[in-house]
Image (cartoon, rainbow, N blue to C red):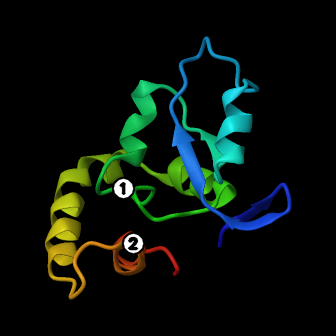
Amino acid sequence: MNSTIGGIADQAALVRLVEQCVAIDDPFDGVIFEIGFDGVDAGGLDASWRQQPGSAAYCTNLGASRLKDVMQGLTADDRAKLGERRDVALKKMLELPNGIVAKDSVPLLRSLAGLPD
C-alpha cells in the first residue's frame, strides 16, 4: 500500500542516501516531492545494501512508510541472499512476455520478495 503525503495518494517513494552530516530537513526533500516522489532517508552507505537488486526494497514501487518498514525489517540473512535473489529475479524478468516493463516487473519483484501486490 502506497502512502498519502501532501494529499497525493499512491505516490512512490524515492530513496536517497545521506551521510550523517547532512540534515534530514534539507531543500532536496521539497524538490523530490515536487517531481512526484516521497523522500525516504535510507541512512548512509553502510545501509545501502537494503536497496540493492535482490532486496525487497528494490524496484517494488512502495510508498514511503511501507518502504521504511521493509528496509528496517531486512536482516543479515537477507543481505547474504541478495545475489541469489537478484539472479532469480533477473531470470524471471527475462521470461516476461512484454520484456522488462514496470507493469509486469513490479508485481513479479513484489511476489519474489513476499510482499503483497
Where is residue 64 drawn, in percent x and y? 65, 54
Viewer-nearest residue: 78 or 57: 57
Query: What residue appears at the point 42 percent right and 45 percent down from the top-left corner?
Result: 50
Residue 90 sits above or below residue 70 on the image: below
Q: Is residue 114 left or right of residue 81?
A: right
Query: What residue appears at the point 48 percent right and 74 percent down from the top-left corner?
Result: 115
Q: Quadrant of the N terminus?
A: bottom right
Residue carrying label 1 = 55
Residue 44 sits above or below residue 74 on the image: above
Q: Which mark is residue 30?
A: none
Q: Residues within 10 Å of mark 1 (few under 14, many from 20)?
A: many
Tag nearer the camera, 2 or 1: 2
Work out which residue is located at the far front of the displayed protein and give it. 35
Residue 30 sits above or below residue 107 on the image: above
Q: Is residue 65 left or right of residue 60?
A: right
Residue carrying label 2 = 102
Q: Secondary structure at mark 2?
A: helix
Where is residue 63 drawn, in percent x and y? 63, 61
Quarter residue 11 falls in: bottom right
Work out which residue is located at the far bottom of the displayed protein and give it. 97
Query: What residue appears at the point 63 percent right and 16 percent down from the top-left corner?
Result: 22
Disc on the earlier residue, 2 or 1: 1
Disc 1 marks a residue whose amino acid type is Ser
Q: Is residue 60 left or right of residue 24?
A: left
Where is residue 84 drawn, in percent x and y? 17, 59
